[in-house]
Amino acid sequence: MRRTCDKIQPVWRRPALASIGPRRLRRRGRQGSYEMSAKPGNTFTVFTKPWPEPSLDELAKLVRGLGFDGVELTVRMGYQIEPATVGKGLKEASKVLGDHGVFIGSIAGPTDATTIAACGENGIPIIRVCEGIDMSVGYAESEKRIRAKYESLIPALDDAGVSIGVQNHSGAMIGSAIGIMHLIEGFDPKHVSAVLDPAHCAVDGEPEEMALDIVWSHLSLVNFKSASHRRTNRITALEAEWEILWTTAQHSGYSWRKMVSLLKAREYTGDICLPAEYSKTSGGGQLMGDDVIPNLQYDIAYIKHLFESGLSAEIEPFRMVNWESTGEK
């Protein structure tokens, strides 16, 4: 039977939108007619990957309606902004989104000089990337080539005031916090910084406290999504086979509560980005479009509660419920 979470809601009233505040590596001015305030505090962004089809105006209304302050904008073929027209596209996106009170905290896109310049011109401080490892040449040689690419981009990054934010990912990629830092520790974080994704640390890396400590000196952005391993073959098989399951906070392989507590203890003021990545019940990829909304509503409400609360483990304002993509437990 298909399980849905359309009626899953926190027991408490959903908090009001957070104020826009200063962030690390943030050069922010006016975007559209929306002027950013100087109030301190974290702001919440969402990765726009699930929504390639809406117009910029529709996207802004959707994001704002879900309770986010900003976006990590997807710059890829088939999306609102495509790499070939990134200069014109980001200018338009900054205005349209800004008119709705939505800022662009980062983009996920190419790191060529044109894109870097376009980000700088529109006050977008981070281009998030995930770096693959070419095992035909090996890990060390792959790192060497990636570093050489970054070195060649430093003049453009410096001129634009933009940082390449390297995120840990899964598979044949830089997969852990220590993997990020081994790659980028020789760079100034204003040029190359760390985007920590604790979900990937949960399946490929370190516990929360260690992961945050490793990347802290270069940290520019933190992702909050949830992952765990799910067995895909029969339990009588000689060896287990696993896949990564993308799920909600309550089924995460790491503790959102603990990670928020660690960030608050270190007085982190950067953006908190929710990648909106959730596995399909039947397998075969991630949910897209409005199918992510019920799960995303749960996660944004929960993380806002954690940042605004005293993080007491004795008070649990959420009902523990099954969610459609967690699979059989």
Image (spheres, rainbow, N blue to C red):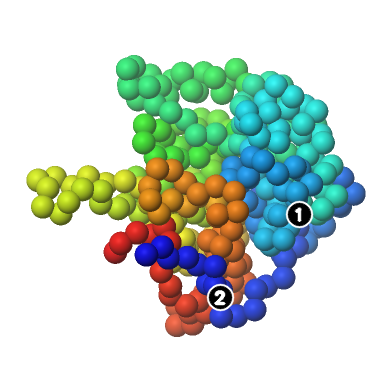
Q: Determine crowd level at label 1: few under 14, some 14-19, many 20+ residues with C-alpha closer than 10 A.
A: some
Q: Which amino acid does label 2 sit on?
A: Pro
Q: Between residues 108 and 123, which one lies in front from this camera angle? A: 108
Q: Is residue 272 above or below residue 143?
A: below
Secondary element type, mark 1: helix
Q: Determine the CA span between mark 1 and mark 2.
A: 22 Å
The residue most toward the bottom is 314
What residue appears at the point 59 percent right and 71 percent down from the top-left corner? 305
From this viewpoint, is residue 46 visible?
yes
Q: Which residue was labeled with disc 1?
A: 61
Q: Between residues 12 and 262, which one lies in front from this camera angle? A: 12
Q: What residue type is labelled 1?
A: Lys
Q: Which residue was labeled with disc 2?
A: 10
Instruction: Locate the C terminus and report the quarter of the image it occupies.
Output: bottom left
What residue appears at the point 43 percent right and 72 percent down from the top-left corner? 321
Instruction: Locate the N terminus and report the quarter of the image it occupies.
Output: bottom left
Q: Is residue 176 above or below residue 263?
A: above
Secondary element type, mark 2: loop
Q: Residue 25 carries which label?
A: none
In terms of sequence position, does the residue under pointer 1 or pointer 2 come before the other?
Answer: 2
Tell us which disc is closer to us: 1 or 2: 1
Q: Where is residue 284 in the image (x, y as percent from the top left)?
A: 40, 43
The residue most toward the right is 33
Q: Is residue 108 left or right of residue 32?
A: left
What residue appears at the point 22 percent right and 45 percent down from the top-left corner? 241
Q: Between residues 273 and 74, which one lies in front from this camera angle? A: 74
